[in-house]
Structures are given as structure tokens and as C-alpha cells.
Image (tube, helix red, strand yellow):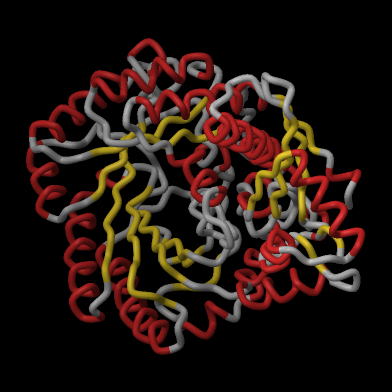
Amino acid sequence: MRFSKFSRIYEICDSSNNFYYLIRHSLLNYSYLLTEKEFNKLLFNLKKNTQDNKIKSLINNHLVVPLNYSEEKFLEYIRQKNNFPFFSIFYLIFNTNCNLNCNYCYTEGSVENCFKNQMMNEKTLTETFMFLNKFINDGKIKHFIGKDISFIFYGSEPLMNLNLFELALNNINALSKKFKINIEKQLVTNAVLINDSTARLLKQEKVNVSVSLDGPEDLNNKARVFHDGSGTFKAIMKGINILKREKIPFSISCTIGGHNVNYLNKNINFFKKIGATNIGFNLLLDAKFKKVISPSNFISNENLLNSFNSAEKEGFFESRVGRKLKSFNSPGKIHFRDCGAYGNQLVFFPNGDIGVCQGYLGYRKHILGKVKSSILSKIVNSPILNKWILSTPINRKECTFCPALGICGGGCAFNSEINYGDISKRNKSFCIHTFLSLEWLIRESLKRKMKDKNIYIKDMSFLYN
């Protein structure tokens, strides 16, 4: 018997100079914390090929394996079970132009010179839902669609075309009733166009609202501006106050940039004060035709991770680190995809294009078909979609034995293409985020479990694998 190559072994010293050992499966997220005495006994039993209850438990969870065990075959088995599309997210985008001019926007910064702005019309929206009716019907029969679907109104700014927004909501309700599926409606908005009648519609339709805001006025207005360069804060807060008056819950989508990276805790306190229910921090993405100035990866992630504790204390769920935490605390489960573009979503663009990723709004690539002519079989058998699915970390040879493989889910493929010319390339910035997140999660979980704030942790896997 031996330790699996997926087993990471961490040596821990507490403030009283006691040693412990954490054995963690980097793919399946199983963890065992042993005293030094228990760990030495484990090593002795492995050497003697003796199975006690501890070793049997480690065997059951693939941390200890036979000498002839093949990690590559086990990973191939996992791939075969999960390398297929399963759709649970549909993006609806009505416009390519926006009413704001945020200085870090990766979609605006990736619009090709020859690209002409597009606005969806009622005919294209009708064709979109005709496609969805057939797609959902066939997808349920062939098990490419489950009982829960999210429709996300995205942009640009979805409320720039309120008529289509209302028509889409009616069509979504009809789909839910017809196919007996649970549908969540989400609106990602800058809130500038929210008025009393819009708010009543959102409340009536039970739309989950996510407002893009980067902090208090002094921080937000450094980056989120109108086309004339004036700040958006007051207009955003006007929309938020209408939501609050109508008792409509809202979350915050906050982009981390040089303007606010050192004030994330201040932001959390502010978002709590204005009544947000939860928050999602976004790391900056690069643009194809515009230089986006990003703060240091290490500073961004250090401040993000530190702010997660502050969010917890304030009763906030922070989604970016929260997804990692959920995977970390889910033994036996793998976080395959951090983004729906890797086989879980379709994006409907204003001109009827069906795409994979919402980032390609003005830089149109990776199109699977048109709403007028596409069918389920054409979508699910598309070489384009297959390439996206195979671009996840479990399919990358270089990621096979990464200690963070089980919580990763892959970075932004759009960003990989912008920086490295191919969606299948490893997103190095996201690797830093995931690796630092893993170190932080291990440290924080041990601090809480051992009730000791001063612990030393070192990855000692090289000694045992």
C-alpha cells in the first residue's frame, strides 16, 4: 500500500510545539487530521502492509491505494462520467452597447473596430423562445437538462430594453409552467434605470437582482462612470433606494481594481449598511483591445481572502471564495466548473447568435449556431462546445496533480484566449487565486478546528509520494 499521488500531506506545528499531519485528497476533498503519534503509526502500518481501521478509511476514500493503482485511470473514469454538457443556465443579452463607460470593462475593451452595435428586436426574441421550447423539450428527454434552470439577464445593461425584458419574463413563466421546471430569474444591472414601475415588475416576477457597485462614492466613481466621465454613484443609489422601498432583496457585484483593492473591508461594511443581502467580488479580466490596469494578483487575493472573514462576521455570503469553501467542505465532491461556459450554459446574443460565453459580446467567437436554425443535437455535438468542456482542469495534463484540483473549476477561458491565444490554455492569474484560496482555507479550517491562531503549515507531500 502507498499514499495516492492525489494525497497531499501537510505538517502542522501548533503554538505549544505539538506536531500534527493533515492528509488531504487534492481531487476528492477528503481530509484527515492526525496527531504525530497516529501519523507515525500509519506510516509503520503502510510499510508492513497492515490494515487497521484508519487505513481502511483512507483506502475507501482513495488516499491510500495499492502499489499498482493508477491515478491516471481513476482520473479518466472521472472524466468519462463528467465530460458532457448539462445545461442549467441561459443568458439573455438584449444590447451590445451600454449606458455606462466603466474604465475596466473587458467586454467594451474587446469590441472589434468593425463591429456594429446590435439591439435585439421582438422577432429575434420570439425566435429565441421558439428555440428554447424545442431545446428544453428535447433536452429533458435526452437528459441534457434538469429540473432547475437559471435565466440571467445580462449586458451591457438589460433594462435599456424594458419591453423585451417584460416579454422575456412572460415567456420564461410559460416555459416553467409547460415543462414543470423550477426557473430562477436573475438580473445583473447597474441599477441606473430602475424606477418605480420597473421595481414593481421585479417584485411581481420574483427576479433576483444583482447590482454592480464598487463601493462608497469616492471609490465607485473612480471606475464606474457615465460616457461623459461623471460618476454613477448617486444614480445607482437612487435605483437601490427604490429596490429597498419596494422591499426587493438585492446582492452586490463588486469588481476589484486599483480603485478599491485596499478598501474591501470598508466596502463590506458599506454594502451591509445599504441593505445588500450578499456580495460577489470579481477579479479584473483583461480586454483584447484595451489595456486594463490590474493591481497585483497577490494583493488582490490577499485582501479578498481577508475580507471573506469580515463578510462572514457581517452575515454576508461572498460568492467567489464561498464557492471554493463549499467545495473544500464537501468530501467526495469535485468542483468541475467555476464558470457555466464549460458546458453548463448557452448565451443568446442580440442578433440571434447562440454562444458559449457572455464575454464575446463585441468580439464574436465560439458561436454554436443561430436561434432560427439550431437544434439540440447540433449544439451538444458541436466541436466548439466540446473544446470548452475539455478545457476544464481535470482534462489538462498539467493540472493533474495540482493540490487545488478539487476546488478549482478552471479560470476564465475568455481571459485565457485574450492572453494566450486559446481558451484551453491555463489561466495563470486564476491559478494564483485558487492556490492562495486553498492555502487560506486549509489554514483557517485548522485554526478553527485546533482552536489555535498560531500554527505553522508546510506541504511535505514530496517526502511521502
Residue 399 as seen in the image, left or right of residue 98: right
| Left or right: 72 as drawn, with respect to 358 | right
Figure check: 109 above or below 49: above
Q: Position of residue 320 (x, y in %)?
A: 49, 40
> Percent x, y for residue 195?
13, 36
- Residue 174, by quadrant, is bottom left
- Residue shown at the point (46%, 33%) measured from the top left: 281
Q: Nearer the viewer, residue 35 or 385?
A: 35
- Residue at 55 percent of width and 43 percent of height: 111
Whole-percent x and y of residue 311?
Answer: 40, 28
Q: In which quadrant of the rendered view does residue 290 lie?
A: top right
| Number of dots carrying numbers | 0
Q: Is residue 280 visible?
A: yes
Residue extending furthest toward the bottom: 141
The residue at 67%/68% (across/down) is 60
Q: Position of residue 57 (x, y in %)?
A: 67, 63
Q: Is residue 433 left or right of residue 130?
A: right
Farthest top residue? 218
The residue positioned 28% from the left and 59% from the top of the image is 184
Asked if residue 386 is positioned above or below residue 264 in the image, the reply reads below
Say whether residue 115 is visible.
no
Above/below status of 388 relative to 372: above
Residue nearest the viewer, comparing 20 with 330 = 20
